[in-house]
Image (cartoon, rainbow, N blue to C red):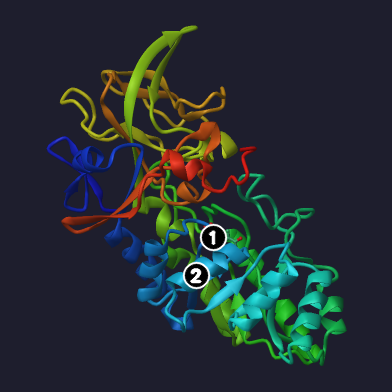
Amino acid sequence: MDHFEYRDRELFCDDVSVSELAERYGTPLFVYSEKTLVSNLNQILTAFAPADPIVCYSVKANGNLSICRLMGRHGAGFDVTSGGEFYRAQQAGPATAKIAFAGVGKTDAEIKHALENNVFMFDVESEQELLTIGEIAKGMGRKAPVAMRVNPDLPPKTHVKTDTSVKGVKFGLDLETVVDVAKGVVNHPGLDVVGLHMHLGSPILKVEPYKQGCAKALALIKAFRDLGHNIRYLNMGGGFGINYRKDEAKPAAAFAEVILPAVKEAGCQLVLEPGRFIVGNAAVLVSRVLYTKATGGKHYVIQDAAMNDLIRPTLYGSFHRVWPVHPAADVPLTPDVNGDPDDPSPFRAMPNCFNQDVVGPVCESGDFLAKDRPLPALKRGDLVATFSAGAYGMSMASNYNARLRAAEVLVTGGTHRLIRRRETFKDLVACEVDCLT
Ligand SMILES: *Cc1c(COP(=O)(O)O)cnc(C)c1O
């Protein structure tokens, strides 16, 4: 459920007209719905309430300070994957917000900074990292709270580039050796092994992988405790999928149904690190049509958003719904998309629509938002919305082709505010020094 809907054939975010926002702030523009953000977070808090969960919003999905602040205000902690994200979480936090630190390549400086700033837990991904954290903490007269991140070696469950729990990926400690690694740090003066961490990958549309992961986690928690480690947290990461197409995703309650019994059996407090589930469907990317053209038997819509604004289609072949902000009276109000994610041709024939590629100005053939997509005829100046663009959109945006990164607006009921201004040409060169002058 999100708060983007058509009223009289015009797209609204909450009670604000999307085209008015485009007029005011320009395009390309990310438009976020506060109500959607908060209700998505609350859906997770409610579904998992019996386990008294600590929900750490995953900053890499969308690190905008206003969005992070909103999460903090509604009771979330943060999951970060770099010193930069740690900084964002601190800027956004309440001071009491819990910050979990994951990632396979934490630097010594990042580890030290996190320890000095009361990191909630390090999600540890290798033996060398574990020992390094232990040494640094010991040198500071501290005990570092660590969760052993385990790769549970499950069957493939999502896109190969975002599946983090199949054998051979770079993430986590090996299932076969993790108990030995844990054995090696019993009574380590710089380490407190407080938890087990397992992030399966993303987006995940089925509950089965969580069920399988939990079973492996339970066995490991028992083994760690038998060694003498005081395990208090089971951190199941994030990864909950969303409806990019139609209704393919599961509600949080479905995941809770398989995760909660394991948490209870483990006698742990639950930690979750959702990103996409909270922010994914809380934004649309609004762009304006520059040109249309037909070439090589294909129809192209060239509009002013590009792979530098939303790289998911290019990087993962991801599907985003794309539709006019003002659909004409003779076309459907919303695109008719088949929700089955395993169906290779999810589009249905629609009246007064024909197949078009929606592309941007970037000089790459791989620069597209949608391919061979039934869409109504569009013309210069029309606005189009790319839906479910809130997660891994702006956070992966770049300045490629020296394009200015988009503006971001947060809508709250009938009001809106700019939460990131559009970049300027000066911003583009601001970090370049000397310049052979
Ligand atoms: C990326 C990531 C997440 C968030 O994944 P979502 O699919 O956005 O929920 C959570 N935990 C870790 C360790 C991650 O790397």
Quadrant in the picture for the N terminus: bottom left
Decide: marks 2, 1 in contact (CB < 8 A)?
A: no
Query: Of the numbered discs in the image, which one, if any, rests on residue 29?
Result: none
Q: Which of the 4 quarters of the picture holds residue 122?
A: bottom right
Quadrant of the image occupied by residue 193? bottom right
Q: Residues within 10 Å of mark 1 (few under 14, many from 20)?
A: some
Q: Which residue is mark 1?
A: 207
Amino acid residing under circle 2: Ala
* Location of ligand 1 given as a quarter of the image: bottom right
Q: What residue is drawn where x is 56% and y is 48%?
A: 431
Q: Is residue 343 visible?
A: no
Q: Is residue 327 above or below residue 55?
A: above
Q: Secondary structure at mark 2?
A: helix
Can you name the residue that lies furthest to the left here? 8
Residue 397 in the figure: left or right of residue 73:
right
Towards the viewer: 20 or 170: 20
Q: Which mark is residue 89?
A: 2
Tell me residue 75's x, y (percent). 39, 77
Which corner quadrant holds the C terminus? top right
Report whether 161 appears left or right of 97: right
